Image: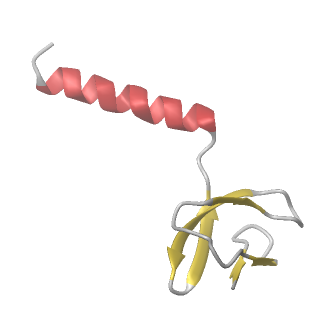
């Protein structure tokens, strides 16, 4: 099973036990990617840890706003 890197279009071989949201790195350009679909296999840019923390903070702020804080 292969998927194409959205950055450099390299065909990346995926392990047979690959699951949705698994993280992979492109061997050609080094892009950090995640599996977003299995049928057919598709990759997209993975969020970096810093971006994930920012999203969590935004969600917390929205929750507090909804609760009237």
The picture places residue 2, in percent across and down from the top left corner, at 71, 83
Taking depth in this image into account, of 32 and 66 the one nearest to the observer is 32
Q: Residue furthest top?
A: 69
Residue at (52%, 37%) from the top-left corner? 52
Q: Residue furthest front?
A: 17
The colour scheme of the drawn protein is: secondary structure
Residue at (21%, 20%) from the top-left corner? 64
Q: Is residue 49 left or right of residue 68?
A: right
Total numbered labels: 0
Residue at (63%, 41%) from the top-left corner? 48
Q: Quadrant of residue 34?
A: bottom right
The picture places residue 66, in percent across and down from the top left corner, at 13, 27
Q: Is residue 58 left or right of residue 11?
A: left
Q: Is residue 62 above or below residue 12?
A: above
Q: Is residue 68 above or below residue 62?
A: above
Q: Quadrant of residue 27?
A: bottom right
Task: Quarter of the image for the N terminus: give it.
Answer: bottom right
Q: Is residue 20 above or below residue 9?
A: above
The picture places residue 31, in percent across and down from the top left corner, at 77, 57
Residue at (89%, 67%) from the top-left corner? 28
The picture places residue 53, in percent across and down from the top left corner, at 51, 30
Task: Quarter of the image for the C terminus: give it.
Answer: top left
Q: Residue furthest right?
A: 28
């Amino acid at each position: 099973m292969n998927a194409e890197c959205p950055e450099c279009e390299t065909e990346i071989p995926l392990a047979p036990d690959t699951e949705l949201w698994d993280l992979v790195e492109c061997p050609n350009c080094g892009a950090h990617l995640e599996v977003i679909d299995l049928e057919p296999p598709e990759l997209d840019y993975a969020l970096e840890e810093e971006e994930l923390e920012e999203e969590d903070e935004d969600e917390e702020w929205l929750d507090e706003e909804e609760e009237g804080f």
